[in-house]
Image: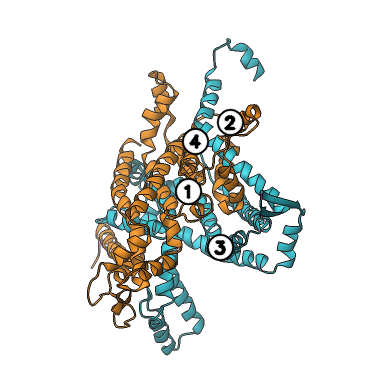
């Protein structure tokens, strides 16, 4: 570095130095925001978690308690650890299913067929409508069937199918699997909207000429998928996995999040911050494991 | 009978097309189900609401629910004000996230790896983790230290209470730290990385400066990311009810009203003489429809743009 700057005339920037400087110009607004509205509040929050933080007459009143909040949360309060383990268990089954489902759907939607514009717009509708707010109203009415017979307007008449299967003397385990799988299609398609979007926008960046060349060279659809489509999609696979995990974990309807929000509403800021920080550490560890397992295998240069 | 390879392929293709059509029709039902439910519940009169023989088609149509729902949501002014906040902050987010993504993708910055991790962290850390300090920051906002600096001279630090001002949204978005902006930055980064560097080189050789290269050459190539960012940011900011209920404390914000829609619907009904002819449920579903309508309309327009931009990038790429 030093020798380079000696070589350069004063007031003259080498291309590399100039380019680095301009990089920071492009990043400046975001870096300012990152520092002010993320890094500083985040570390204050860690400070809160080590205190008993209450709102008094003159703003926040803090009493140092060390790791008392964490201790209480992990070893005395029974719910926190139990909620987190059940969330992780749900995640392990849901993430691969969502990943494969959204990949298949996006490949299907990327094909050339009549009405594909309409089909695409259909699959993104959950992204737009599936806010927790609206779903809560719908679920409150439809899925619990207030004032209605149990399977009246539920999405699939799973009960009927289950009855028929039971009459055919099919094993109860298989019936439960079928019914849960069908009732999951709704959940699945409603949680895969963004993931499909991410995959599709990547698929559309692949030039058609690649496939033309491949087919001229005699590659079949299977080969061109693994040789062309998949390498391009691989970075997006990780993005989608990470997104799904974060989306599930930060979903305000999951049990850990509801308990954190409840503590906030009870104004137990110290305890709420402690559980939020702990929860974040758990997310970080899980994502770290994912990155270690899959991150290195991806060639980002494509 | 011997089938030629070609006919075999043809049969396979059309069989797949049939399967695809059937599958998509099935999925269409699943995907549209909630909207259908909302519509059928919103347009039915009270008498049909708990009638088990009526599932989809009501005995008569009624628009009353919508009028009451709009009132419960705060009327047109609330709708337009919320829409303005969401739209402006989305546009600001797009501007900043694209710049940051470009900065990360195209410049040899030593810390860029760290910055990428931080972009991911802003999405990973739930806002609930740091919302209380964030609230206090906006309650006593010192304009990035400038207020405190003035305070050194006047003895009284200059702070503003921004929790009642919509500039909270604009400040967060112009700085690229609004709802889930980290993911947009990463999206732009991936997009800019995929653009061949020869394009940039050519622009430089032709004498374009850094900013001109960015705005004229790189930006148009990132159109798919812009469209995706626009749609997703609109949706997330519009639907986010946590931020407006903790930091931006204004009652008109639509998502915040949607949280208490049951109470609001009951209140509106209580003030009305028609109360006996209406039900909360109908009003709630009408409110849901009104709430998602702006996003659905916006999406209808943007969808076209999305396809167009995809086709264009197919030719140039």
**Could you classify mark 2 by the number of other residues whose Cα lies within 10 Å: few (under 14), some (14-19), or many (20 or more)?**
few
- Output the letter for the chain in cyan: A
Chain ID for label 3?
A
- Output the letter for the chain in orange: B
Chain ID for label 4?
B
Q: Do the residues labelled 2 and 4 touch (CB within 8 Å)?
A: no
Pointer 2 residue = B146
For the residue labelled by badge 1, is the local secondary structure a helix, a strand or a loop? helix
Mark 2 or 3: in front is 2
Pointer 3 residue = A91
Chain ID for label 1?
A
Chain ID for label 2?
B
Badge 1 and badge 2 in a common chain:
no
Q: Are marks 4 and 3 in contact (CB under 8 Å)?
A: no
Mark 3 or 1: in front is 3
Pointer 4 residue = B100
Residue A302 in view here: no
Residue B95 in view here: yes
**Image coordinates for residue B14, horizontal then vertical, percent:** 26, 62
């Amino acid at each position: 570095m030093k020798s380079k700057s000696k070589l350069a005339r004063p007031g003259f920037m080498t291309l590399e130095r100039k380019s680095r400087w301009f990089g920071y110009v492009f990043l400046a607004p975001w870096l300012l925001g990152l520092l002010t509205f993320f890094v500083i509040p985040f570390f204050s929050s860690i400070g809160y978690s080590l205190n008993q933080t209450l709102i008094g007459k003159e703003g926040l009143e803090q009493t140092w308690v060390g790791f008392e909040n964490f201790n209480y949360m992990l070893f005395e309060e029974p719910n926190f650890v139990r909620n987190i383990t059940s969330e992780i268990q749900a995640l392990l089954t849901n993430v691969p299913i969502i990943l494969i489902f959204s990949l298949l759907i996006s490949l299907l939607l990327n094909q050339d067929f009549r009405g594909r514009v309409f089909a695409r717009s259909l699959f993104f509708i959950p992204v737009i409508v599936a806010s927790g707010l609206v779903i809560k109203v719908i679920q409150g009415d439809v899925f619990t069937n207030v004032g209605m017979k149990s399977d009246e307007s539920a999405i699939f008449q799973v009960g009927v199918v289950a009855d028929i299967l039971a009459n055919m003397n099919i094993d109860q385990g298989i019936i439960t699997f079928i019914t849960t799988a069908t009732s999951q299609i709704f959940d699945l398609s409603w949680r895969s909207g963004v993931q499909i979007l991410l995959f599709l926008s990547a698929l559309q960046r692949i030039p058609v000429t690649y496939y033309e060349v491949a087919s001229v060279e005699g590659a079949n659809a299977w080969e061109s998928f693994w040789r062309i489509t998949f390498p391009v999609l691989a970075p997006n696979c990780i993005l989608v996995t990470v997104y799904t995990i974060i989306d599930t974990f930060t979903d305000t309807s999951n049990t850990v999040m509801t308990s954190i929000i409840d503590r906030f509403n009870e104004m137990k800021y110290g305890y709420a911050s402690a559980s939020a920080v702990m929860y974040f550490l758990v997310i970080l560890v899980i994502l770290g494991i994912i990155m270690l397992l899959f991150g290195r295998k991806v060639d980002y240069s494509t | 009978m011997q089938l030629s390879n070609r006919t075999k392929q043809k049969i396979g293709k059309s069989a797949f097309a049939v399967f695809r059509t059937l599958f998509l029709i099935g999925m269409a039902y699943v995907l549209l189900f909630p909207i259908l439910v909302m519509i059928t519940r919103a347009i039915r009169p009270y008498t049909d609401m708990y009638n088990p023989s009526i599932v989809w088609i009501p005995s008569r149509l009624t628009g009353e629910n919508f009028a009451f729902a709009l009132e419960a949501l705060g009327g047109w002014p609330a709708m337009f004000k919320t829409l303005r906040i969401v739209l402006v902050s989305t546009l600001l987010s797009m501007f900043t996230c694209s710049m940051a993504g470009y900065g990360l993708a195209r410049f040899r910055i030593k810390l860029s790896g760290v910055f990428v991790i931080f972009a991911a962290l802003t999405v990973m850390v739930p806002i609930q983790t740091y919302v209380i300090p964030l609230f206090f920051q906006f309650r006593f906002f010192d304009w990035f230290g400038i207020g405190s600096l003035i305070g050194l001279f006047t003895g009284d630090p200059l702070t503003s209470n921004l929790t009642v001002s919509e500039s909270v949204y604009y400040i967060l978005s112009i700085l690229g730290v609004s709802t889930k902006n980290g993911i947009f930055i990463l999206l732009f980064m991936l997009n800019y990385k995929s653009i061949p560097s020869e394009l940039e080189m050519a622009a430089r050789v032709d004498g374009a400066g850094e900013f001109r290269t960015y705005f004229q050459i790189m930006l148009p190539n990132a159109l798919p990311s812009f469209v995706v960012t626009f749609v997703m940011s609109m949706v997330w900011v519009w639907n986010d009810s946590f931020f407006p209920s903790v930091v931006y404390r204004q009652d008109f914000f639509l998502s915040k009203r949607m949280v208490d829609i049951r109470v609001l619907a009951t209140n509106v009904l209580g003030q009305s003489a028609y109360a006996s002819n209406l039900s909360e449920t109908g009003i709630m579903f009408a409110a849901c429809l009104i709430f998602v309508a702006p996003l659905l309309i916006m999406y209808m327009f943007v969808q076209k743009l999305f396809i167009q931009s995809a086709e264009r990038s197919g030719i140039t790429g």
